[in-house]
Image: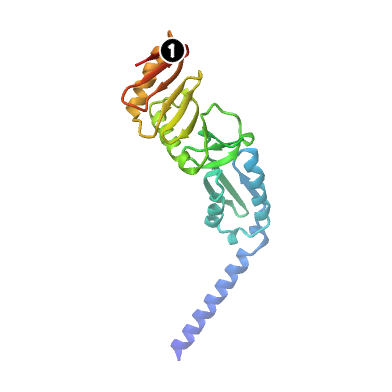
Amino acid sequence: MKNIFKIAIILALTFIIIQVEKDFKNREFFNISKVQISEVSPNLKSDLEKIKTEILGKNINDLNLEGLEKKLLKDVRIKKAVVSKQNLNEITIDVIEKDSNYYAQHNSRIYTMDEEGTIFGKLDEYPKKSMPILVLKDAKEKEYLLEIMEKLKELDLKDEVSQLYAENKNLIYIILRDGTKIKTEPEVSKKKYEITMNLYKELIKAKVIDYIDIRFTDIVVMEKEGKSAR
């Protein structure tokens, strides 16, 4: 009988503690009164302000921080998001935006694209940068254009490129900053790009180059006047 009485007392005390804790957590001073947001682009900021408005006034103990982070990461513009409690009624939203590595042109529209090929914004939504333009018709084409750009980037040649587009998979044009065209295809090796660019830098000292074709065993150079050299 004594054991039953002890158990009853323990259960009663546990219930009281839970209720007290619940009542304490639900007090008004736990209602969120301040949400700090890290500095982001104006376009993203307007959307984060909407989330801020939804959060303000809610009890901080009821806020699912991990769930909010996952919600933020669904936005293709966001690379990383961390939501943390600062005080009893304040939270901070730290967001790192994706970097623009390329412009992607589809039909007449131009978008910003990260190094993995994710398109996340329009041209007028971000500050203008000097980046290669990849002219895209479909996802498959984007895949092999990015493969070519990756080879060039590894050779520190990305900044030499103005535009990249494909006539078809076997004929891809790399347009350099001075207008010189390089005809290539996906299987061309990184080493061949290195040789081609070294050759190009030597040739332009004395000649005006129309295009360089590197799709075959020999590298073919065509001058503006129509002369061909190997």
| Residue that protrudes farthest toward the left in the picture | 217
Q: What coloring was used for the rendering?
A: rainbow
Determine the secondary structure under disc 1. Answer: loop
**Residue sticking out furthest to the top:** 206
Residue at the disc numbered 1: 204
Q: Quadrant of the C terminus?
A: top left
Q: Residue 163 location, x and y as percent? A: 51, 28
Q: Indicate the position of residue 71 as horizontal and vertical percent values.
A: 56, 53
| Image location (x, y in percent) of residue 145 | 45, 35
Instruction: Identify the image quadrant of the N terminus.
Output: bottom left
* Label 1: few (<14), some (14–19) or many (≥20) C-alpha neighbours in 10 Å: few
| Percent position of residue 137, x then y | 52, 39
Residue at x 38% of width, y 30% of height: 154
Q: Is residue 202 above or below residue 66?
A: above
Identified by mark 1, the residue type is: Ile
Q: Visible in this render: residue 116?
A: no
**In the figure, 1 relative to 170: above or below?**
below
Is residue 33 found left or right of 146 in the rendered image? right
Q: Residue at the front extreme? A: 226
Q: Is residue 194 visible?
A: yes
The front one of 11 and 137 is: 137
Residue at position x 53%, y 48% from top? 82
Q: Quadrant of residue 220?
A: top left
Q: Is residue 128 above or below residue 120?
A: above
Tell how many labels.
Answer: 1
